[in-house]
Amino acid sequence: MSLREKGAITGVGETAYSRESGRSVLSLQLEASLKAIEDAGLKPSDIDGVIPYSGVVAEDFITNLGLPDLRFSAVTPLGGASCVAAVQCAVAAIAAGICNHVLIPVGRNGASGGRIGMRVQQMPQFRLVGEFEMPLGAIAPAQLYAPMARRHMELYGTTSRQLGEIAVSTRANAMLNGNAVMTKPMTIEDHQASRMISDPFRLFDCSLESDGSCAIVVSAAERARDLRKPPVVVMGVAEGHPDSPSVITQRPDMTRLGIAKAAPRAFEMAGVKHDDIDVAEIYDCFTYIVMCQLEDLGFCKKGEGGPFVESGAIRLGGKLPVNTHGGLLSQAHMVGMNHIAELVRQLRGEAGKAQVRDAEIGLVTGYGDMGDGSVAIMRRG
Amino acid sequence: MSATGTYNKLVPEPTPHSAPYWEGLNRRKLLLQKCRGCGEIRHYPRPMCPSCHSMEVEWVEASGRGVIHSWTITHHAFHPGVREDLPYTLATVDLEEGVRMLAQLRGVPDDKLRIGLPVRVEFETVKDGLTLPYLVPGEPA
């Protein structure tokens, strides 16, 4: 059994994104969840599956939304790859006949609460890094990921300015979005002048830490057709884990991420080619991670990500518009759920000033936990 | 160690699988796990050989020689304990034994860093019962 076209995104909901919500993570998630359920034209009581993200549990949604008969709950602990992996999990549960409408909420007080950059040492999947690298001063994701980018630069001649093009393009898109934390224009010179965090990553190569919540509803494809909005059908979806999944230091090829394994599966399931993709929302915790995924997905060859982005390909109006909402770099860090929400808007034709004309098929990725990857290909239903 | 004598950096929490590694560092030896089933050397220490699934290991001493695989130069203090060290270079190194390690690299100017640069491991006792490895320029193989 294939998961092809078994599920569809039927609702999306977002809170305001900020640096200080002044509210609990659960209340943020409940607000976004209600919005997503309403967007789908459903009632909370229709929700029969929940895939929560860290900090809250399925029971919180039963209790607060008054869910009468939750039939499915699971977690997909892949860090930033969790949201798209949760779509795969939801579609699998739907295809198996367990449930019909799965709520997937994400929310955090990433700016006003505990600093995300310092969270890693408390996460069990990073036990090896915590024992063997953090005591040596390699503490935060910026430091743990930077050697991947440095090696790419040394092997392929990739430049900081090419990484900067990703930051600049993403900022330009954020300025078209009414719900972005960063609203000032950015130039390549601004990027080059931003302070060095962990070479080659400058401040503007790093994503935001944000407060807010984003939620989606994944529904059985045959039920999605009768709901309020045109469904966004999941054509193909996959997750992939890199070799040496939790320790980049020991990875045979540190320029290759888990998504390199997932991408061929997702494209085959979807039955589409790269040229069919009209818009792509690519997980962007760091600029380099976007470039590396574009290569691992097959939009350009390994090592050619720098010239690819420098050509303007990822700009609105380019060959492959990327992160049309402003991404984690400039809209808000919502673990990539905001990437799924934006792809849904694009494929519904609801993306406003950032709308890619005639967008019919799009792609969204997740990346997290030192290299796990996930990818979904969706179409306008 | 800081001027007050209080070590305020992150410290490892050895496990039964890794205790010999940390004890080795205290004796200024870099020890690696070698599978008794198939002979494969692995790092970081963990319970099972991914090739033959044996859980029997012996510990072998590494030469301490290797070459740079990649690096980052950190300018931001992600923990209060590293503020005085900024900026510092973290190097990922291909050891002669075929595994990699990560440690701070000292004595190499930023513009001399390159893939393949020979380095060797030194040891520094940072607090009672804790010795950490660091890297210095090494001789070409």
Image (cartoon, helix red, strand yellow):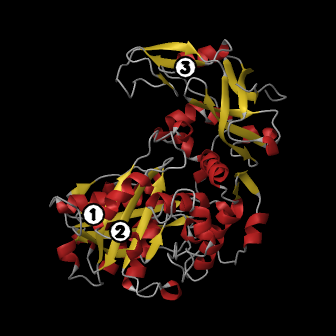
Report the quarter where the N terminus of chain A lies.
bottom left
Q: CA distance from mark 1 to mark 2?
A: 9 Å
Location of mark 3 (residue): B32
Q: Answer above or below: position of A115 versus A130.
A: below
Q: Is residue A205 visible?
A: yes
Q: Residue at x 74, y 27 (%)?
A: B140
Residue A68 coordinates in the image, percent (x, y): 20, 64
Q: Residues within 10 Å of mark 1 (few under 14, many from 20)?
A: many
Residue A207 coordinates in the image, percent (x, y): 60, 61
- Most foreground residue, B71 or A21: B71
Would you say A75 lies left or right of A20 here?
A: left
**Residue type highlighted by circle 3:** Leu
To which chain does the residue with label 2 belong? Answer: A
Same chain under badges 2 and 3? The reply is: no
**Residue type highlighted by circle 1:** Met
Badge 1 or badge 2: first in the primary sequence: 1
Would you say B39 lies left or right of A181 here?
A: left
Q: Residues within 10 Å of mark 3 (few under 14, many from 20)?
A: many
Residue B77 coordinates in the image, percent (x, y): 73, 46
Location of mark 1 (residue): A269
SS at mark 3 in the image: strand
| Outermost front residue | B141
| Outermost left residue | A97
Report the quarter where the C terminus of chain A lies.
bottom left
Q: Which mark is residue A377?
A: 2
Are the two marked residues, 1 and 2, in contact with CB atoms closer than 8 angstroms? yes
Residue A269 image-quadrant placement: bottom left
